[in-house]
Every structure is written in structure tokens, then in C-alpha cells.
Amino acid sequence: MNKNLIFRVLGSIILVLIGFACDRGENNNSNNNNNGNNGNNGKVFSIKDNLKYLAITDAKSLFIARPETTSKSTGVTRQTLFKITTEGAVVEVSYRDSANNVISSQQILPEKVLNLTEDYILVIFNSIDGSQNKPQLMVRKSDGAAFDATNMPAPSPDDYYYRKYFGRTQHDGNGNIYFKGNNNGMSELIKVNISNPRNLVASRYSAAGESVWSFFVDNAGNMAYNQRYRSADIGFVNNPYGFVGTDGNNDSIITAYLKNEPIRDYLQFATISGNPFKLMPYGDSLKVNAISIPTPQGDVLYARFKNTKKAYCLMCGQIIECWNPQRKLKTTPLMQLGFTPYRSEEFMVNTDHFMYILGYSSPGLNVPDKLVQYNPESGSSKEIKIVSGYELYQIEPMDNDKLLVYALRLSDGNRVLLEVSAEGEVSVQRVLDNEVITSMERIN
């Protein structure tokens, strides 16, 4: 055979093989750009349809971190969901599809985590294409199974402000959760039945046209918000007495008011209920210094302890044990803990056995300068030496009476995650390298 002919044939074969390889490479690149998880058969990746499991079964707390700057190459700021495990490790949460294949986290932009109940959390995602339609998944804590929750209204953006008073979500004894939902900038109370996670039923629970900023709901589904009381059976009535919280069993809504007119130097607690509206006082009146307080609208710092069935609030410069099984009220002056009296404390959060109070040591300060751990059973307290070296952004409870604190370390300007032990010791969990935390929540 002519050698030139052989070379021409071989050259043709090589060109065909090169073309075939290039074609395969382009197709593979196209598929990878569309789904990124090698298991979607060329379809566009969808969180609702494809993300079925989150690895959170060993998580005690979750937080979302993002870089301080947007990526110049993609124009997208990557957001990463981390968990703090039962062993105290900080680990990125992985995602899986229905076939148990790992999904690339590059296409998943978690925005917010919300602890719904003892069994479920809500995770809200940003759309990678920048659209306003944000996917939502309700995730079961026990196995990480994810369920589409896009028919639930998105929580209101101001929910952290409410968190300083009690909690972002509450639930009754009938399998319903309640939270503030965002409806065109108006905060409405939303009730969601989660007994069947594959068929979530959401409805507005507040009156039409009313914007809500704080609320409490008891086990029966009775609710107080603003100057309203809603009976689970009867409907809305006006509530001139406001509300403080719920009792230690979460069976009724409680309030407090000043009496002994015109001096108004005694504080009386009562439960509220029904239609017609009823006020049912309990316990002895507490003698307080004559001071005019506004009708409480859920803006009183409040804590409830499941293990003792007791509830506490901060009013009139005192920590008040406002509910116990004996219905006998007890008080501890805030001055005894080193706080200035009669100024709204900045924040209070409770763990299983302690209350942590962030506040002011003198009335002239603009920034809270004191964090105190208070044991309501023994009456003992301990100052946590943290405030002077850090600017505190967020405080969340952990198990074993610990605190998780997101803060700015003033000595070097680094943002850090801190853990405060029950003994008051402060340790650094993670130094955030040019990252900011956008959401942080205890889930177990």
C-alpha cells in the first residue's frame, strides 16, 4: 500500500477521534453546568425536587457563614451551612438526593435556619439565579429528611429582634407551629399544621390588615399579640392588659399590671382568657417602687424552664419568678446582680438551668457591658468576663448549659464563634476568616 495513503487514512482517524473527544467534553461541561451533582440527567438542578437529605442528625447547633465580599468570577456570594456536632466539632453540612448521592454545595445557597419544633427545622435558600423565589425545606432532625415547604410564608426579616424576648417560633399541643410571616412587608401571624410534612397547611392566624411584632400561644392554641387575644375556639377579643408570656406548663397566657390606684405600687400577675375577656389574678401582689410601666405587649424579657415548670420575667428592676406550681411569686433585684435598675436589659436567654442576662452596669452607657449567668433555683449569679474584650452580635443557648456567642474580637478585629461553659469559661470555637454569620440557631 502507498505510504502516503496510509498516512492520510491515519490522519483522518486521528481527526475523527479528536472531534469525538471534544464533543464529549462539551456535553459533559454542559451537563455539569446545569446540575453539578452528576445525577440529574441534564435537567436544571432544583432544591425542591433534588435535595432530599441534610446531614444534621448529629448537630446541636447550625449556622450559616458567607464571605464578606462577592465572588468576582461568578457574581455570587457562596453561603455555607455548618453544624456544631455533639462532639463539639464544626463541620460543613453535606446534602444528598433521593438516591443518596452527594450533591455539590456550590449550587446551594442557604440563607436562614429556623428551629420549628423538637422534631423539625426550616431552612430557607437563596436562588442561585438571583430570583425572588426562595426555596424552603422543612427538615426532620432525626434522619435529615427534607420536605418541600415553599407553600409556607417566609418568616419576617425582623425575627431576631423578637428572639431577644422569647422565640422565633412557638407551637401548641396539637401539632401546629406559629411564627411571623412576611406578607408584602407586613408581619402576619402564620399557623402551620406540620402533622403531615408532605402536605403542610398554612393559614393566617392574626386579624387581616394587622402587623404583628410579638406574640405568645399556649397549648390549646389561644394566642395574645399586640392588644388582641384570640381564643382557639371563639375568635378575637380586645386585650387591654397585654401579656408577659405563658405559664410554666404553657397551658395559659399570663400578664401583669400595677394596682393600688393612684399610687400603683403593687404588681399583680394574672392569667387571661376567653370571650368575654376574663382576668384571673393569682399569687400575692408584689410591692414595687412606685413607677409607671406601660401595658406589656410581649416586650418583657421572659424565660420558661421545662424541667421545673417555672417561668420568669424582668420587670420593675427585678427578676420575677412569675409562675411556679405553687403560684407563689418570688423576686431578685437586678441591682443584686450588678445591673442598673429600671432600664430595659438588652437580652436574656435561658439554657436548661441558667438564665444569661446581658445589660448595663450604669444608666449612662449606650452599649451593654455586663453578661451575668443567674441560677434561678439557688439565686446565685456569676459574671461572664467576655463583654470587655468582644462586641457581641448574637447569643444562642446550647446543651449542657453552654452558650454559643458570635462576636467581634476587639484585640485583632476578627469575628469569632465563642463557647461559654456552665462554669463561665470562654473558649474560641472558630475564627471566621473574612466571613460573616448570617444565621445561627440551636436545634437540639
Image: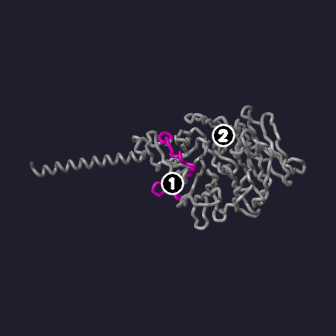
Residue sitting at the far left = 1
* SS of the residue under disc 2: strand
Seen at 66% across and 34% down, the residue is: 174
Image position of 198 (left or right of 330): left
Does 404 sit above or below residue 282?
A: below
* SS of the residue under disc 1: loop
Q: Name the kind of residue labelled 2 in the image.
A: His
Q: What residue is shown with label 2? A: 171
Residue sitting at the far right = 262
Magenta region: 48-74
Where does residue 308 sit, x and y in percent of width and height?
71, 45
Where does residue 77 sit, x and y in percent of width and height?
51, 54
Q: What residue is shown with label 1? A: 77
Using the rendered view, name the quadrant where residue 238 is placed: top right
- Colour scheme employed for the rendering of this structure: one colour
Q: Nearer the viewer, residue 366 or 207?
A: 366
Where does residue 253 sit, x and y in percent of width and height?
75, 41
Q: Residues within 10 Å of mark 2 (few under 14, many from 20)?
A: many
Which of disc 1 and disc 2 is earlier in sequence? 1
Q: Name the kind of residue labelled 1 in the image.
A: Thr
